[in-house]
Amino acid sequence: MLEGRNFSYTRGDDPLFSNLSFCLKEGEMLAVKGTNGSGKSTFLRLIAGLISPRPATLYWDNQALTSRNLRLYQQSLLYVGHKLCLHPEGSVKDQIRLWQGLYGLSQKVIYDALELWGVGAFHDKKISHLSEGQQKRLSLSRCSWLDRPLWILDEPQSGLDQTGKAILSQVLSQHKETGGYTVLATHDHIPGTVEILL
Amino acid sequence: MINRELRNLYLHGGSLLAAFSFLALALFCLSLALGHAEKILSQSAPAFLWILAILTTLFSTPLLLKAEAHAGLLDEIILHPSLPALTLLAKVGAECLLFGLPLIGVGAFMSFFWALPLTEVATLSLTLLIGFPALSALGILGGLLTLHARGGSLLIALLILPLTLPLLLFALSAMEMTRLGLDSSGSFCLLTSASLLLMILSISAGNWALRFAVEG
């Protein structure tokens, strides 16, 4: 179970949000909604433990997260932010090799995921030569090959075409069915989600 | 982990080549400018090489980190199961292999144009071999500390450049001892200690600075 209690964040002198609480059970999806600049990305980065103050108000498996167990928690999550964590100077093949080195997976597992996301044919292409949507698909393909129970996705639908959105929807449903947790920032309505408005 | 960072650094090949070309060209210009004064050149060239190594490392490493931060790759370091400090250490290792070793090679190559005796060439190479990991770690620390700061280069000059002075002084002291035919082991001990200490401090501080940099 992922539970957040009294989430507050102030940027400079402006409070972005205050006293936000949520509780996410197995197989549930939390959709964080709000206008541009309302703090959706910040909220997601707080949940991922990328922003301090450390979320002492965040509970994972009924344990409050502190600096001691934060790293363990971070190993259970997959974060795909606005910055796509792709090496723009390299090719898709280079990126796969980097991922392989980073997570110790076989190339086949990653290539299969790329096929699913429709970017398998671009392995020789330089990442900076891919379109925004193709880069997004490449980055989101981590959902399919990295086995993590908690997904934190920042506007995963942005930049995707209808086919991309359909693949995302299918992958999210599968994750939900297997009991995975998902927190995502979105402007769209996604059926079957718990919503938070910032 | 070093293998992964080598790949990562290899993908920044253009920036690395630019930094390396700057260093090689500056050394070439120095040799041309002081070519007529062979004695001055042979005495001052090692110091120039060290100063250029310091400047190139401190100002090129932050650019590589900036590119990584721009792509969101620093988030990945924080979220990866291995300790961020180990990743930073792997970055130092990769930079030593892809930038430090060629730098030593260029230094050794240019030494023949500066008419340095073989013992001095060996001493110069050894000082660079010992000192470069600390320079690289300091470059990473500087890059992380100034990632979101305006005028980052100026801040690096103010914050990090003074920390390289012990390395420069002990390295040049070792060179001078060798040139005079004296025992240089004391200077080497001091250089090794300074390099180790600076590397440990830079990586520890870098670990903290990385979180600070990721928070933006």
Image: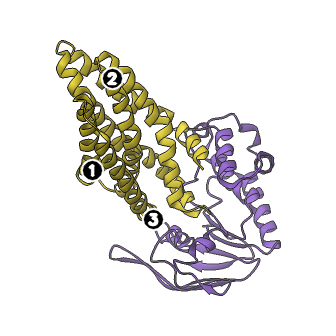
Chain colours: A purple, B yellow
1 vs 3, front mark: 3
For label 2, the residue is B25
The residue depicted at 56 percent of the width and 46 percent of the height is B5
Disc number at residue B211?
A: 3
Nearer to us in this view, B121 or A29? B121
Residues at badges 1 and 3 in contact (C-beta under 8 Å)? no
Mark 3 → mark 2, Cα distance in angstroms: 37 Å
Side of B192 relative to A89 (left or right):
left
Q: Amino acid at mark 2?
A: Leu
Where's residue A79, x and y in %?
61, 63
Q: Earlier in the sequence, mark 1 or mark 3?
A: 1
Do pointers 1 and 2 mark residues of a single chain? yes
Dot 1 surroundings within 10 Å: few (below 14), some, or many (20 or more)?
few
Mark 1 → mark 2, Cα distance in angstroms: 26 Å
The residue depicted at 62 percent of the width and 72 percent of the height is A72
Work out whether B138 lies above or below B56: below
Check the image and name the residue furthest to the top: B36
> What secondary structure is marked by label 1?
loop
Can you tell which quarter of the image residue A91 is in? top right
